């Protein structure tokens, strides 16, 4: 059985069409900033103080968090993320 390679170019275009590209670049800049400073982020996520989906940016601040804390949020009854 032959394993197909992932269509990276197609996935990238889909991300751009969905409007995810700017947030992706913001997350990438935050990770690179910490790497440049020599911070050991092994096993941790780079979290934004104000979520990107809520209009946050790297200017609002970043921090290291456990993956569990960074990827789980309090939700409303409709499933939307609660405001801080």
Image (tube, rainbow, N blue to C red):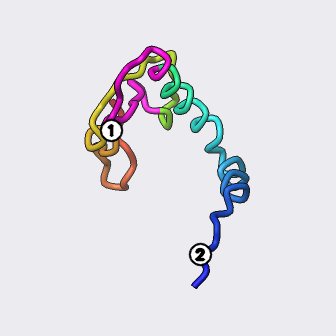
Residues under labels 1 and 2: Cα distance?
A: 33 Å
Of the residues tagged 1 and 2, which is closer to the observer?
2
The residue that label 1 is drawn on is 70
> Residue at image x 58%, y 38%?
24
Which numbered tag is attached to residue 3? 2
Describe residue 23's horizontal placement relative to residue 35 as left or right: right
Q: Is residue 36 magenta?
A: yes
Q: Quarter of the image containing the N terminus?
A: bottom right
**Residue nearer the viewer, 17 or 76:** 17
**Residue nearer the viewer, 43 or 58:** 43
Q: Quarter of the image containing the C terminus?
A: top left
Furthest-bottom residue in this view: 1
Describe residue 74's horizontal placement relative to residue 45 as left or right: left
Q: Residue 6's x, y, as percent?
A: 63, 64
Q: Is residue 56 visible?
A: no
Q: Residue 78's x, y, as percent?
A: 37, 55
Quarter residue 29 falls in: top right
Describe residue 77's horizontal placement relative to residue 28 as left or right: left
Which numbered tag is attached to residue 44? none
| Residues tagged 1 and 2 counted as in contact (Cβ below 8 A) | no
Name above or below for residue 59 compared with residue 82. Answer: above
Q: Residue 38's x, y, as percent?
A: 41, 17
Quarter residue 71 falls in: top left
> Residue at image x 52%, y 29%?
55
How many numbered marks, from 0 up? 2
> Residue at image x 52%, y 25%?
32
- Part of the protein shown in magenta: 34-51
Q: Is residue 69 magenta?
A: no
Q: Residue 70's x, y, as percent?
A: 33, 38
Dot 2 alpha-carbon crowd within 10 angstroms: few under 14, some 14 to 19, many 20 or more: few
Which label's residue is closer to the chain start, 1 or 2?
2
């Amino acid at each position: 059985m032959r394993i197909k390679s992932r269509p990276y170019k197609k996935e990238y275009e889909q991300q751009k069409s969905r409007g995810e590209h700017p947030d992706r670049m913001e997350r990438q800049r935050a990770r690179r900033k910490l790497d440049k400073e020599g911070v050991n982020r092994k096993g941790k996520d780079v979290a934004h103080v104000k979520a990107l989906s809520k209009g946050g940016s790297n200017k609002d601040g970043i921090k290291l968090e456990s993956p569990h804390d960074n990827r789980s949020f309090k939700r409303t009854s409709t499933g939307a993320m609660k405001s801080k």
